[in-house]
Image: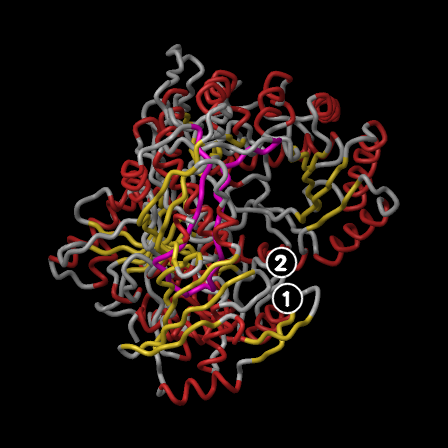
Amino acid sequence: MTFTDMETRILPFVEKPARYIGGEFNSIVKTGTSLTRVALIYPDMYEIGMSNIALKILYNTLNSHKDFACERAFAVWGDMEKALRDNNIPLYSLETKTPLKDFDILGFSFQYELLYTNFLNILDLSGIPFYSRDRDETCPFIIAGGPSSSNLEPVADFLDAICVGDGESRIIEMSQTIRYAKTSKFSRQETLQALAEIDGVYVPQLYETEINGGFIIPKGRIVNRFNETDLTVLDFPVKQIIPSVKAVQDRSTIEVARGCARGCRFCQAGFCYRPVRERTVNQILELARNSIQATGYREFSLISLSISDYSNLSSLITALDGQFSSHGISFSLPSLRLDSFTLELADKVSQIRKSGLTFAVEGGTQGIRDTINKGVNEDSLFNVVEIARGLGWRSVKLYFMVGLPFTDIQTEIDGITELVSRLSSRFRDISVTVSVAIFVPKPHTPFQWAKQLPFDKALQGFRLLKDRFRKNRRVSIKYNDPFISTIEGVFSRGDRQLSRAIETAFKQGARFDGWSEMFNFNLWQDCFNKLGTDTSLYLNGTTPSNPLPWQVINNGVSTEFLREEEIRAKSGILTPSCDTKCEQCGVCDFKTVAPKLNSKDTQEPQIKDDFLFNIKIERTEEISYIRFLYSKTGSASFLNQIDIEEALSRGLIRANIPVKFTKGFNPHIRVEMGWALPVGFESEYELSQLELNAPINKKDFIERYNDSLREGLRILDAVNLDAGHKLNRATKSQRVNFSFIAEQSKEELLTRYKQNMEFKKITPRKEKIINLDEFVGNIYFENGRVFVEYFQTDGGARIQDIISAITGKDTREAVALKPFVHLRYIKDNDTKIPALFA
């Protein structure tokens, strides 16, 4: 089955078909038989994977290299999985629709442990053997990376190689090694041996194993985590791909720093991503400018483990505000810390957003916070809320954990209750959302030996907390699924014996285990019971003297330092931040590896006046309107109306068209849209209209706009109008010419049409009888297609109603008939006025 066949036989019948079509703006298609082909795969839904910054970085890195062609793939939802299996279609890449099994390399990003069954599903849908040992010379190499690379032992038997650490240079060296091995006719085993010689690369198949303390322990050469030492010399992608459907993080992202100096003892990222490496203010400014121009987003997010610890934050925010605010471009600051939230910062942030503030308090008492080295106190929290309230915020969200070492659940729940009660009592005009989760001990942290809180005790604590605030409408209690946290805990500190459990759970239907609506705890328990897997081995913790499954990985921080931190935690002793005092954790050699801060950067921020010079949020007195005609064909036909509007809006920013913004709290571009076509229907006559700050030449408008639109959207014509010509007046009642494939004879189709001419239309408000004779002007047949002229108006017949009456097919089935709109027009007596000019 070709992809064209899929567009008619499969995509119309699945949820959000635009997830599977590709063709996005800024995606890259490279062809050539000499290229080494790499597919980067995020084993979760498209909307989540497209938000991942690592995918953006590695996609750009590989495609910037002349020898590599990099494409993307994601996990598919259940309806698409069934369609692929039923039709014997292998999972494919988005860029060229190539089956994944035909790539040289498949690179998986594991952001967390509950993606493992999705990973196996992708291999299964691709026809690739699960186990590394079972793959032959025709199979792609399966490599992996991401935060979970600190311990991928549960899936180690499935992986050919693991990149431990920063991936930019590693992905290139691994790909070059595989490319050379292929041209040199290396055996698969010889290629694995070559990969193992690369710094930061772990090849599990080359390691012997032994059972010690109940764990399967790999034995062999220690793999040292690889760190990119200087962020300022690394390329960062500004031409980020614009998703076909709204992503979870629907904005551009700019990485300002890696690493965190704080040393919170529960935080794996804080230990694994040491040391802190920052970009300069001017580099961030330039990246942000280029990213907005390349993507058309009106918001970008500054990404860092702790953005409020950026050493030049005040200067950065002032510069960003000065560069972007007048253009209607906003930016967000995730991961704010209580003890870094100053009045100056709050004042700037309040100009960016007022939707609410989120802070990770983690522990309800000072003793608990000292145990985990979370150097914040209650005064900081109350001071922040006071500042926020004064600047207009009316909500705050607080994160807490329970099950932390050296305390008990009752103390934790009592502490959260008392702290939140005092906060709510003092700030009666502030709503507080409390989010609570089980603490999951992670490898390579001071708490890697700790016991995890059982799910039943956590659930009791969560319910007690909810009950205590049941009568307080200003406090909302939410908690993470404790059963999901339990499985996460098993795999977080798991070993290779868990691979059988993952395979068994997959075969029994486990998918998307991180999604509460998809997660099945009983299924996992059954799998563990059938295999005789004792999950307490991973949940009950161990002692520092026992070997650990992940000890073959050296993340830089010494075991001795982690042990010292655990001892300090037990006594509630704080460890100072790395940027205050070096505690000799083992990461830095202060030659090649050392913190790189920009606090001493004296260069003045460079604000560019020519940036998006046509895009101004201030409304001018001058008003101009332009109506444009566009086509939506091919992959773009699977975008819904909202996605098309977003695509058109972002194209305007990229093209630097002088659009006018709406008034009010959240100014936006008003793109006035015409009628919405069903998903999968094509058209060469769709209309939109814009209000502009200044007139624009029609030819210039069309050329610039077309250069800024995704595949399948094309501006065909445009007309400048005065203020009296509203699009809704031209399109509310109009004539439409459309056609579709005639699969049966003229006589059969017309007979069915007469039988179905009258039907009941049900709306949320009422039911009414529609008689198509009132709306259909003419039906004729030509070159194997049915052509229809009909009258479209509010509350009347729709294109899909007419096709259904003639063919008996519903809207989704009708896509196979290739419906196509040719013209929309207004009839003035006997004169047809195309809607573009009406």
Closer to us: 84 or 565? 84
Determine if the magenta segment contains residue 233. Answer: no
Residue 80's mark? none
Determine if the magenta segment contains residue 691. Answer: yes
Please report contact status of discs 2 and 1: CB closer than 8 Å, yes or no.
Answer: yes
* Residue at the image point whose x is 55% and y is 33% from the top: 662
In the rendered image, residue 580, in percent from the top left (x then y), is placed at 53, 18
Q: Residue furthest right?
A: 471
Disc 1 residue crowd, few under 14, some 14–19, many 20+, Cα 10 Å? some
Q: How many marks?
A: 2
Magenta range is 664-693
Q: Is residue 283 above or below residue 255?
A: above
* Residue at the image point whose x is 44% and y is 47% from the top: 688
User: Which secondary structure lies at badge 2?
Assistant: helix
In the rendered image, residue 346, in percent from the top left (x then y), is placed at 62, 22
Q: Toward which corner of the image does residue 386 lie, by quadrant?
A: top right
The type of residue carrying mark 1 is Phe
Residue 822 visible somewhere in the drawing: yes
Q: Toward which corner of the image does residue 586 lie, by quadrant?
A: top left
Q: Is residue 343 left or right of residue 135?
A: right
Q: Residue furthest left?
A: 184
| Alpha carbon distance from label 2 to label 1 | 7 Å
Q: Is residue 5 left or right of residue 650?
A: left
The type of residue carrying mark 2 is Ile
Placement of the N terminus among the 4 image quadrants: bottom left
Disc 2 residue crowd, few under 14, some 14–19, many 20+, Cα 10 Å? some
Q: Is residue 742 above or below residue 614?
A: below
In the rendered image, residue 252, in percent from the top left (x then y), is placed at 44, 38
* Residue at the image point whose x is 34% and y is 36% from the top: 655
Location of mark 2 (residue): 484
Location of mark 1 (residue): 521
